Image: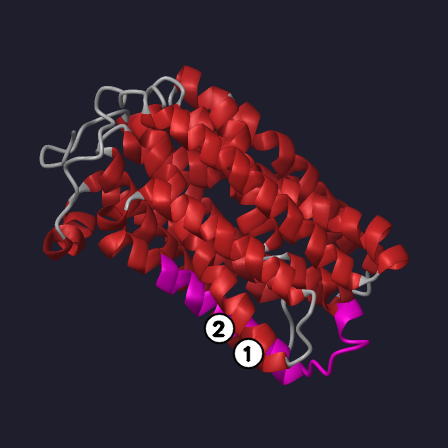
């Protein structure tokens, strides 16, 4: 539990602050910094590309650099950049800092996956990773507290500084924990050997069931969740619904995500990750299906399904992959999964924009997203019915 708590705090810093604090603070920052809509669009595009680049870099060369070193390095870089953002006034420098934060977040998560896969027992791995991945939801909540309690009294600069201070604290705790883990032997089947050669990584993704399904799942999750979140408030406005409904929906997402990691992770440890994936994918699909039938009535239900699925999914899926691959190979596959997630999100947003332009409404967009979520749930059902089955060629420690 200690490892889950400390690495969960790493997620709060790297993803909750590093990826999402700017979006929370930008309305206040624009009062003193000339951030145009063009700057904001550039930030959105470059941070997405940087996240994909960091994930791809981790999958290709992360096993050569040492995950403990990478975890501490990304923690230090993130903390420094959070502090720096409180002082920057030039939009181009802000864009550069946010781009680096996005790449650092991707590398941080992949490194955590490798360390946990190496040191956590198979009976605890999915629960531990699921709890850690839900740290992003806690970051959402802390961002809200910064906006409500800190920024009105002390200014947006203090928000960045407090985030950076927490980053330094978390890095210290992480350093102390990694020293302890270094003296402990790896769990059976979790050693850092048996990396997939870079020349065989694509063949492994395409040719082995576990790796292929993991990437397909991440593609579908990106395809459904990113357009859902990006267009939700616009859709509610199109329907003439109050703006507060969007606020309540995102509050539901965050609160659900805070507890979903622990609960679904325990389910994965006790009953298997396949069942946990089926439950969260099924909940997400039911939420979206209800939402397209009556958005005003079921927006909060869709938010519940989103929080139930999105935050713990990363940990449960990594734990599922880790049952069949060594810790190093799991890290490599997780890096490629993040890339496919980004590709799915990009395609989903492009399709949403095209449908919005072609039809003049977002109704068809959310119908497509609901259909894709059903495909995701059916994939979860297939995995559950197929049950655990090792890939004959998977590299193990």
Asked if the magenta segment contains residue 314, the reply would be no
- Asked where in the image residue 322 lies, by quadrant, the reply is top left
Q: Quadrant of the C terminus?
A: top left
Binning the other alpha carbons within 10 Å of mark 2 as few (below 14), some (14 to 19) or many (20 upward) gives some
Any part of residue 276 in sight:
no
In the rendered image, residue 107, in percent from the top left (x then y), is placed at 39, 52
Is disc 2 placed on a helix, strand or loop?
helix
Mark carried by residue 46: 2
Q: Is residue 123 above or below residue 138?
A: above
In the rendered image, residue 388, in percent from the top left (x then y), is placed at 26, 25
Q: Which residues are magenta?
A: 27-54
| Number of numbered tags placed on the structure image | 2
- Asked where in the image residue 364 lies, by quadrant, the reply is bottom right
Front-lying residue, 339 or 350? 339
- For label 1, the residue is 42
* Left or right of 393 on screen, residue 149: right
Mark carried by residue 4: none
Identify the residue at image location x=71%, y=60%.
24
Any part of residue 320 in sight:
yes
Mark pair 1, 2: CA separation: 6 Å
Identify the residue at image location x=64%, y=44%.
166
Front-lying residue, 368 or 266? 266
């Amino acid at each position: 539990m200690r490892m889950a708590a400390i690495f969960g705090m790493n997620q709060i810093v790297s993803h909750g602050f590093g990826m999402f604090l700017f979006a929370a603070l930008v309305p206040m920052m624009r009062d003193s910094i000339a951030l145009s809509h063009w700057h904001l669009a550039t930030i959105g595009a470059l941070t997405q590309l940087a996240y994909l680049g960091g994930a791809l870099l981790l999958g290709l060369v992360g096993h050569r650099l040492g995950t403990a070193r990478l975890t501490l390095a990304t923690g230090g870089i993130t903390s420094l950049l959070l502090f720096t953002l409180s002082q920057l006034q030039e939009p181009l420098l802000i864009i550069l800092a946010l781009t680096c934060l996005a790449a650092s977040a991707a590398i941080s998560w992949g490194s955590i996956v490798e360390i946990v896969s190496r040191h956590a027992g198979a009976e605890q791995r999915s629960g531990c990773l699921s709890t850690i991945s839900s740290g992003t939801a806690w970051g959402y909540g802390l961002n809200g507290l910064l906006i409500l309690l800190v920024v009105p009294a002390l200014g947006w600069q203090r928000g960045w500084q407090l985030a950076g201070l927490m980053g330094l604290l978390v890095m210290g705790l992480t350093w102390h924990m990694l020293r302890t883990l270094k003296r402990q032997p790896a769990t059976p089947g979790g050693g850092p050997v048996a990396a997939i050669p870079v020349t065989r990584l694509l063949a492994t993704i395409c040719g082995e069931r576990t790796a292929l399904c993991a990437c397909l799942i991440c593609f579908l999750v990106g395809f459904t969740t990113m357009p859902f979140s990006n267009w939700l408030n616009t859709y509610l406005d199109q329907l003439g619904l109050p703006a507060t409904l969007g606020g309540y929906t995102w509050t539901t997402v965050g609160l659900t995500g805070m507890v979903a990691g622990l609960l679904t992770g325990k389910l994965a440890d006790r009953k298997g990750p396949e069942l946990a994936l089926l439950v969260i994918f099924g909940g997400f699909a039911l939420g979206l299906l209800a939402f397209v039938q009556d958005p005003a009535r079921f927006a909060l239900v869709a938010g519940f399904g989103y929080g139930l699925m999105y935050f713990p999914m990363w940990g449960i899926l990594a734990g599922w992959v880790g049952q069949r691959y060594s810790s190093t190979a799991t890290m490599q596959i997780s890096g490629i999964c993040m890339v496919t997630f980004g590709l799915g999100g990009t395609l989903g947003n492009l399709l949403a924009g095209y449908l919005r332009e072609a039809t003049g409404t977002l109704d068809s967009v959310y119908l497509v997203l609901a259909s894709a979520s059903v495909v995701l749930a059916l994939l979860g059902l297939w995995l559950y019915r197929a049950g655990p089955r090792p890939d004959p060629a998977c590299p193990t420690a």
